[in-house]
Amino acid sequence: MKTLGVRVSATTAAHTDVGGLDLDPDPGTPAAVRDEKVRRNPRLYAARHVVEGVAKVVVPIVVVWLLARLAFSVPLPNIPWPDLPSIPWPDLPSISLPRLDWAPPYWLQVVADNAKYVVPVLIGIGIACGEVRRRRTQDEKKAALRASASARARPEDRGDLGEG
């Protein structure tokens, strides 16, 4: 496939929406039923995927937190450790760097501390919105293609034989 003078694979063209149409599943198949549900409620479909992504991040964190609380609540046995020699660390000169007397606002600290959790969610929401937009344009292209095909159809194909 050639687009704008650049050779593009069909997969790349489909993902970037530079050409072509999505294939429709055969009517009555489970894929067609699923596709119809997605097209009827695209925001619900996208929101479900975003919630699943958030759950994939949050649930393991909560489970690890609960396991850590359980592990630290179990009393440990008292082990008699041998007296180990102390390590003679060298005395290094301390370097004093200038300190800025500025603290970011509280909300910015919270956002920076949680960015590793928030940024993937925001990226997921952006991708989901892009997919909803892409499906909407695909539906518009298919409707235009069907309209032009029915307009070009011969009278015999439409059942209008001109008999009267």
Image (spheres, grey):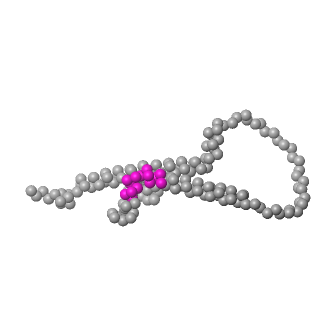
Is residue 7 something that shows in the picture?
A: no
Q: Residue at x 50, y 48 (%)?
A: 126
Q: Is residue 31 left or right of residue 94?
A: left
Is residue 153 something that shows in the picture?
A: yes
Q: Quadrant of residue 75?
A: bottom right
Residue nearest the viewer, comparing 164 with 85: 85
Q: Residue at x 58, y 56 (%)?
A: 59
Residue 41 within the segment the image draws in magenta = yes
* Image coords of residue 157 (percent x, y): 20, 60
* Image coords of residue 4 (percent x, y): 43, 51
Q: Which residue lies furthest to the bottom in this view?
A: 29
Residue nearest the viewer, comparing 78 with 90: 78
Residue nearest the viewer, comparing 69 with 1: 69
Q: Is residue 152 left or right of residue 163?
A: right
Q: Residue at x 16, y 57 (%)?
A: 160
Boundaries of the magenta span = 35-48
* Image coords of residue 72 (percent x, y): 72, 58
Q: In which quarter of the image is the N terminus?
A: bottom left
Q: In which quarter of the image is the C terminus?
A: bottom left
Q: Quadrant of residue 32?
A: bottom left
* Image coords of residue 78 (percent x, y): 82, 62
Q: Residue at x 61, y 49 (%)?
A: 116
Q: Residue furthest left?
A: 164
